[in-house]
Image (cartoon, rainbow, N blue to C red):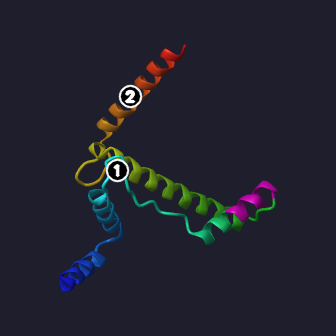
Amino acid sequence: MVAQLQEVLDAVRRLPSNQRLRLAEQIMRETAQAQAVTLVSIQRFPTHKQRRLDALADKNTEGQLTEVERLELERLVAEAQQLALENAQVLVRAQRPDLFDASDRPIKRRVMEAVRAKARAERALGDKRK
């Protein structure tokens, strides 16, 4: 049993990181005992990058950025935004797997239908409050 587990772990380590994360999410979901619980793997912006982003943002607010620092700030902001987008997709995928195809790409038609349904529900709720 231990040898088999080690073989499985070795195979998992050879997977690309995005597939490893998806596998971990699936295992956590399947082993979660409460149906009301959704477990997902959210990535964090590295601490050193967040500190640098904060420092550059402060300098930017004070109008003291050099051109090189401005470019670095833009790069870090883009990285943070990309990470936020990826995390949002992980959350949506966990809650609404029906919105994604087998290749893990959003299905535009289904996403748009879901957005319209959400907007209708919110309008109806707003009408009831009036």
Determine which residue is flagged by label 1: 94
Question: Residue 56 placed where, x, y %?
Answer: 72, 63
Q: In the displayed structure, does residue 116 sit left or right of residue 107? A: right
The residue depicted at 26 percent of the width and 58 percent of the height is 30
- Identity of the amino acid at label 1? Ala
| Magenta span: chief secondary structure | helix
Q: In the displayed structure, does residue 51 sit left or right of residue 100? A: right
Q: Nearer the viewer, mark 1 or mark 2?
A: 1
Question: Residue 128 placed where, x, y %?
Answer: 48, 15
Q: How many marks?
A: 2
Q: Which residues are magenta?
A: 54-63
Q: Which element is circle 1 on? A: helix
Q: Which element is circle 2 on? A: helix
Of 44 and 63, the residue lying toward us: 44
The residue depicted at 21 percent of the width and 82 percent of the height is 7
Of 68 and 130, the residue lying toward us: 130
Determine which residue is flagged by label 2: 116
Q: In the rendered structure, are the residues bearing label 1 and label 2 in contact, judged by CB atoms less than 8 Å apart?
A: no
Quadrant where the image shows the N terminus: bottom left
Quadrant of the rendered structure where residue 111 is?
top left
Q: In the displayed structure, does residue 123 sit left or right of residue 5? A: right
The residue depicted at 76 percent of the width and 65 percent of the height is 66
